[in-house]
Amino acid sequence: MGRKGMHLLRRNETVFEYLPPDGVTSDLNEFGQHTGERYPVHRDPVQYRGNISTPSGVVSNEFFGTDTRYTHVLVMSDPDVDISELGMIRWKGDLYEIRAVRPSINTFSAALRKKTANRAEPWEDETPANSGSEVGG
């Protein structure tokens, strides 16, 4: 296959933006008090290339374990990419949560869940690893 095989892989890749995590912030109510709802804060986006598609087949479903709350799968040919579960993906104008990451020897894969609104939503079902750091709101 050689060079022709690599060309086919590159042709299927799309450009997307990764928004790296930068802590969390809390909403303030009309009295200036924290509401308790925490939102992730992200740094400036970084552009990457990868294959983003809807999951299909048993292998995709079993690859990320029991978490089936994802709508798309990201696959990249660079296994050493600096993408974490606390960041976000922006692709075709939509935002995606990173539900799980699975680096391997030759590739990097991530399970993505499409956000219903472009505004960041509070964490509902899990607490991030760096939840102790509050950023002023």
Image (cartoon, rainbow, N blue to C red):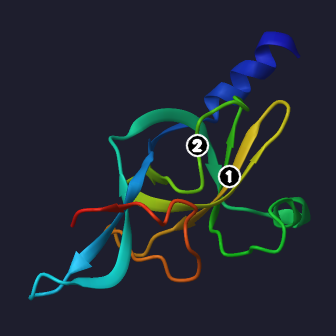
Do callouts 1 and 2 mark residues in contact (Cβ within 8 Å)?
A: yes
- The residue that appears at 80% across and 62% down in the rendered structure is 64
Q: Is residue 43 above or below residue 93?
A: above
In the image: residue 59, left or right of residue 10: right
Q: Residue at point 90% right, 66% down?
A: 58
Indicate left or right for 132 with 56 as reference: left
In the figure, 24 relative to 49: above or below?
A: below
| Residue 36 drawn above or below residue 21 | below
Point out residue 97 in the picture as x, y percentages from the top left corner: 52, 63
Which amino acid, by three-letter code, is at mark 1? Ala
Residue matched to label 1: 110
Rendered location of residue 123, percent (x, y): 47, 76
**Residue at screen point 43% across, 60% down:** 95
3D distance between C-alphas at marks 1 and 2: 9 Å
Q: Viewer-proximal residue, 76 or 2?
A: 76
Give the quarter of the figure containing the N terminus. top right
Q: Which badge, 1 or 2, is on the more N-terminal residue?
A: 2
Depth check: give the residue in front, 116 or 27.
Answer: 27
Among all residues in the image, which is located at the extreme top?
A: 3
Quarter of the image where one finds residue 25: bottom left
Left or right placement of residue 134 versus residue 55 in this view: left
| Residue tagged 2 | 83
Frontmost residue, 71 versus 25 = 25
Q: Secondary structure at mark 2?
A: loop
- x 49%, y 53%: residue: 87
Q: Secondary structure at mark 1?
A: strand
In the rendered image, residue 62, in percent from the top left (x then y), is placed at 88, 65
